[in-house]
Image (tube, grey):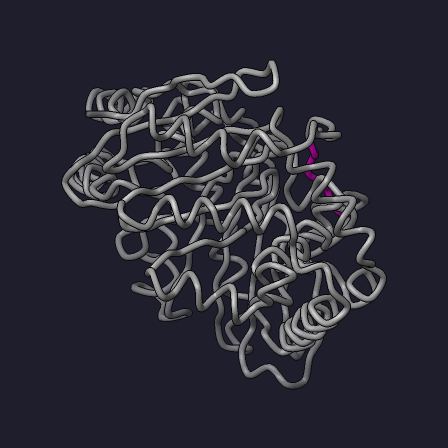
């Protein structure tokens, strides 16, 4: 059966549950999604830090003891954060799923709130931040964010900075978990070899003991336009030029024309070989091994984003080619051959992205979360199949804003 939306009442609040019954494999997958609780909703680095702490197990078992209990029954239980959401996932064989739920109950009742776990996470987080200083892709990407998201939390990496990590206290983590992981800001995704009655029982075992949240709705973040189109980070250690670029893209996440953006993105730079970016930069000129560009449509922001690396001496030419490709794409649109090729690939490959249970459930969740309807995937493929060249080119030409590109370049010279 396909996934469906149901509701469960907990403490007088209706919780949306995305449920799919699937008995092909005797396993169960569940994800607790806490809205307005991700990396951009709180103190810099705190959400990701708190997820890391929950991954350290319970106070009584400790990290290794808790992990060994799960591993003995082949249970996956972990916490992760996105920009807007905090997620806890469990995947287990049907016979061990209840045990996994019981362990999650214990985890939420007694997280590993200890100085030892705090010190461990701080050391690992700061080590990663220091390591990223020598990852020039990360440097270029973070510098681009500092330019286009200036004066917002998106200006900084989601892991935080060395200073923000050092300033996170145990009380900060407790306060975040107690105020953000609430029963009233929750969406549950569950499926597998499990009845909805059993799903309801297990969900209530976890959710009934959660507090009421104290979150605020995520606010939109507008892209900024820096005074200078080109921003250089000079580093003598790099042997290549790392180029990241972005521009505004004025299309809301729930807009009916998202399927056109998907096809346009595929042709321009999201599909790898065969895309305009790869054809012009690699195939024709040999300037790079890979070049990618695509549209980002999130609830709080949307923009055009791309990246590549090239030889230092080819830097200027590569920058010119990127700008020319985007300009030509917007001004002249695409060809019938490009549209037909994109249709063949998308219509053939998209169904394969929803083969597994977790793929289908996550896809359904995203459609629900982004207000697109549960049948959006079918509608998208139908709309793409019927899309005409004139319709696509009219859409592309209406988004001239993507031509106004900001570049972030890590290099040895300007």
The residue drawn where x is 61% and y is 46% is: 108
For the residue pair 49 and 236, the one nearer the viewer reads as 49
The residue drawn where x is 53% and y is 71% is: 64
Magenta part of the protein: which range? 220-226
Taking the image as shown, residue 112 lies to the left or right of residue 43, namely left
- The answer to which image quadrant residue 257 occupies is top left
- The answer to which image quadrant residue 350 occupies is top left
Q: Main secondary structure of the magenta part?
A: loop
260 up-or-down from 180: above or below: above
Where, quadrant-wise, is the C terminus in this rendering? Answer: bottom right
Q: Is residue 263 visible?
A: no
- The answer to which image quadrant residue 135 occupies is bottom right
For the residue pair 368 and 284, the one nearer the viewer reads as 368
Membership of 239 in magenta stretch: no
Q: Is residue 191 visible?
A: yes
For the residue pair 83 and 294, the one nearer the viewer reads as 83
Give the mark count: 0
The residue drawn where x is 47% and y is 57% is: 321
Taking the image as shown, residue 33 lies to the left or right of residue 359, namely right
Tell which residue pokes out farthest to the front in this image.
Answer: 60
The residue drawn where x is 56% and y is 73% is: 241
Residue 315 % position (x, y): 55, 70
Residue 375 % position (x, y): 30, 20
Residue 242 % position (x, y): 56, 69
Residue 132 % position (x, y): 63, 72
Membership of 221 in magenta stretch: yes
296 up-or-down from 219: above or below: below
């Amino acid at each position: 059966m396909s996934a469906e939306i149901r509701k469960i009442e907990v403490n007088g609040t209706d919780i949306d549950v995305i449920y799919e019954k699937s008995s092909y494999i005797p396993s169960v997958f569940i994800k607790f999604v806490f809205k307005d609780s991700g990396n951009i909703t709180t103190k810099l680095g705190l959400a990701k830090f708190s997820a890391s702490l929950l991954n350290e197990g319970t106070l009584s078992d400790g990290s290794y003891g808790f992990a060994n209990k799960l591993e003995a029954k082949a249970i996956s239980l972990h916490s992760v954060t996105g920009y807007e959401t905090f997620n806890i996932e469990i995947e287990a064989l049907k016979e061990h799923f209840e045990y996994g739920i019981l362990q999650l109950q214990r985890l939420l009742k007694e997280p590993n709130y200890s100085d030892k776990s705090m010190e461990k996470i701080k050391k690992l987080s700061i080590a990663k931040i220091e390591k990223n200083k020598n990852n020039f892709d990360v440097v270029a990407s973070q510098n681009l964010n500092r330019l286009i998201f200036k004066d917002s939390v998106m200006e900084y990496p989601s892991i935080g900075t060395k200073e923000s990590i050092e300033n996170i206290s145990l009380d900060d983590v407790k306060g975040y978990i107690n105020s953000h992981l609430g029963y009233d800001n929750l969406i549950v995704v569950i499926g597998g070899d499990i009845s909805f009655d059993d799903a309801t029982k297990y969900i209530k075992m976890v959710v009934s003991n959660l507090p009421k949240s104290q979150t605020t709705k995520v606010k939109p973040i507008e892209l900024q336009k820096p005074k200078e189109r080109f921003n250089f980070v000079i580093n003598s250690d790099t042997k290549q030029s790392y180029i990241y670029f972005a521009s505004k893209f004025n299309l809301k996440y729930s807009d009916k024309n998202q399927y056109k953006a998907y096809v346009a993105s595929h042709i321009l730079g999201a599909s790898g070989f065969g895309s305009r970016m790869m054809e012009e930069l690699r195939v024709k000129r040999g300037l790079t091994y890979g070049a990618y560009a695509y549209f980002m449509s999130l609830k709080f922001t949307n923009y055009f984003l791309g990246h590549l690396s090239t030889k230092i001496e080819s830097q200027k030419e590569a920058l010119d080619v990127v700008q020319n490709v985007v300009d030509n794409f917007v001004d002249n649109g695409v060809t019938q051959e490009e549209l037909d090729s994109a249709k063949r690939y998308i219509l053939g490959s998209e169904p394969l992205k929803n083969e597994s249970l977790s793929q289908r459930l996550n896809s359904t969740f995203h459609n629900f979360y982004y207000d697109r309807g549960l049948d959006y995937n079918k509608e998208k493929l139908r709309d793409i199949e019927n899309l005409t060249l004139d319709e696509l080119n009219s859409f592309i030409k209406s988004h001239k804003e993507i031509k106004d590109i900001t570049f972030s370049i890590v290099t040895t010279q300007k």
